[in-house]
Image (cartoon, rainbow, N blue to C red):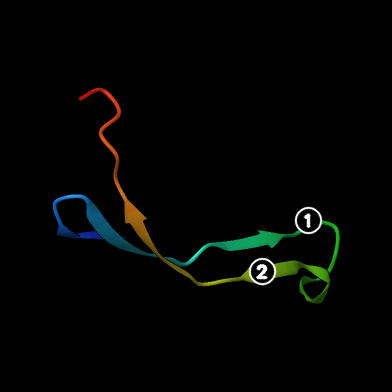
Amino acid sequence: MEWAFLPKWSAKAEYPHTEFKHDDLPDWTAAKFHSFRVGVNCHFDLFR
């Protein structure tokens, strides 16, 4: 999710979830990764 709060500035939040599971293995052996990221972006106009 990203929100522009000024013409060249925005804030973002991400929640990536990754799960690795092999069909032949029980569920408790699956590797699961949860993370949460937040950030601020400055947008540049390079062709101006």
Q: In which quarter of the image is residue 5?
A: bottom left
Residue 36 x %, y %: 51, 72
Residue appearing at x 25%, y 22% in the figure: 47
- In the picture as drawn, the residue positioned furthest to the top comes out as 47
Q: What element carries label 1?
A: loop
Quadrant of the drawing holding the C terminus = top left
Q: Is mark 2 on a helix, strand or loop?
A: strand
In the foreground, 7 or 30: 7
Residue appearing at x 35%, y 55% in the figure: 41
In the foreground, 5 or 33: 5
Q: Quadrant of residue 22?
A: bottom right
Residue appearing at x 24%, y 56% in the figure: 9
Residue appearing at x 76%, y 67% in the figure: 31
- In the picture as drawn, the residue positioned furthest to the front comes out as 48
Seen in the picture, residue 47 relative to 25 is either above or below; the reply is above
Location of mark 2 (residue): 33
- In the picture as drawn, the residue positioned furthest to the bottom comes out as 28
Location of mark 1 (residue): 23
At label 2, which amino acid type do we have? Phe
> Can I make out residue 2 in this image?
no
Q: In this view, does 43 lie to the left or right of 35?
A: left
Seen in the picture, residue 34 relative to 48 is either above or below; the reply is below
In the foreground, 26 or 31: 31
Q: In which quarter of the image is residue 32?
A: bottom right
C-alpha separation, residue under disc 1 versus residue under disc 2: 18 Å
